[in-house]
Amino acid sequence: MRNFFFIIPEFPKAVTGGTLYDLNLFKELKNKYFPIKKISVELKPKNTNLRILSKILNLPHGSTVCIDGLLTPYLKNCINLLCGRFNIILLIHHPVTQENNFFPLLNLKDYFLERSIFNKKLKIITVSHFIKKELQKYMNKYKKIYVAEPGIEDIFFMHYKYKETSNIISVGNVIPRKGYHVLIDALAQVSGDWSLTIVGNYEIDIKYYNELKLKIKKFDLHNKIKFIGVISRETMLNYMREAKLFVLPTLFEGYGISILEAAIMGLQVITTDLPVLRESLKGKDVQFVNYCETTSLSLAIEENLKKEHSRNKIKNNFIHSWGNTRKKFLEAVNGKT
């Protein structure tokens, strides 16, 4: 394969599970001498579709072009043109419709948009078997969908010294679907000496962030909850080493990489009972609660803060490696549409 290009979205002030997947997969392929080139596209309010299109059309005719699924809404008017010139692969972390679960009209619009794109003559790779089943709702039954689960970086498997604390950590950008409003409501019912650190960009949805700050003020939790924004992976590891619980009452995930990372480090994890998380966290030390059940969540947090918890780290193996992701990705690339 002579010309292989990877088109990924660029978020200057945010890190998502999807971008971590893209960058780690690109690095893994590059390190194994796979002839791949990365093209980043910054998502700006204006002319994003034109910038994506111009970058792709400048590539050699007949190239294989893998496009991150977050960019699919910008391809609606040119997907036929692209499929006629290139071997197109869509890497879907989750349907865009799921990003708009709080906005039903946008959800419906995105559904028909994605359905029209997914059924074109292109190849689809996704990150979990649950998302594969979700995508099958959009497509004709003969369309093949490949799965290449994400790996976990080696640093999460290393042995560290841990502190016994009452610290809680949440990792994920500060947007409604991550459920931070649910978490704050639950923590308002939790007694004792605890603290919560939220890692993730809080500038994506300023309105939501301000609502959370008002909620924190209402419950007088400003000395217990802090937002620290986007930090390096090494700094995040330090916070995880000093935490007892990882809690994320998310509405949905494509895979839940940050939750799996916490479980692998041996933290007690409390998260929403979702089919995709049952899949990605199978066999891990996780307590599942139903979404938006603040009383159940607060009881789970209080119970786990009180009990002793020995960190049972997961041993590194090929199943959780980016080498395995690369293997499955290349099998999909070389498979039939």
Image (cartoon, helix red, strand yellow):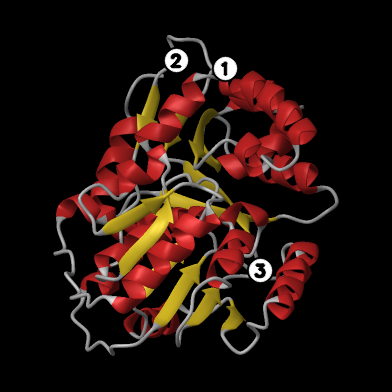
- Residue at image point 49% right, 74% down: 190
Type of residue at label 2?
Lys
Local crowd at mark 3 within 10 Å, few (<14), some, or many (≥20)? few
Whole-percent x and y of residue 322?
A: 29, 55
* Residue 313 appears in view: yes
36 relative position to 244: left or right: right
Marks 1 and 3, how far apart in space? 32 Å
CB under 8 Å between callouts 1 and 2?
Answer: yes
Look at the picture and state if 99 lies above or below 42.
above
Give the secondary structure at mark 3.
loop
Residue 28 pos. (x, y %): 33, 57
The residue that disc 3 covers is 12
Q: Say above or below: 64 vs 191.
A: above
For label 2, count other residues whose C-alpha is less than 10 Å away and answer few (under 14), some (14-19) or many (20+).
some
On residue 98, the disc is: none
Disc marking residue 119: 1
Task: Give me the C-alpha separation between circle 3 and circle 2.
Answer: 35 Å
Q: Please name the amino acid that badge 1 sits on.
A: Asn
The residue located at (72%, 39%) in the rendering is 53
Kind of element beneath mark 2 = loop
Mark 1 vs 3: CB contact within 8 A: no
Q: Which residue is mark 2?
A: 143
Instruction: State the residue at coordinates (34%, 69%).
Output: 303
The quadrant of the picture occupied by the C terminus is top left
Residue at (45%, 84%) from the top-left corner?
192
Q: Secondary structure at mark 1?
A: loop
Q: Quadrant of residue 72?
A: top right
**Amino acid type of the residue tagged 3 in the rendering:** Pro
Give the vertical position of 66 relative to 110 (above or below): below
Instruction: Pick whichever, 59 or 166, lies toward us.
Output: 166
Q: Earlier in the sequence, mark 1 or mark 2?
A: 1
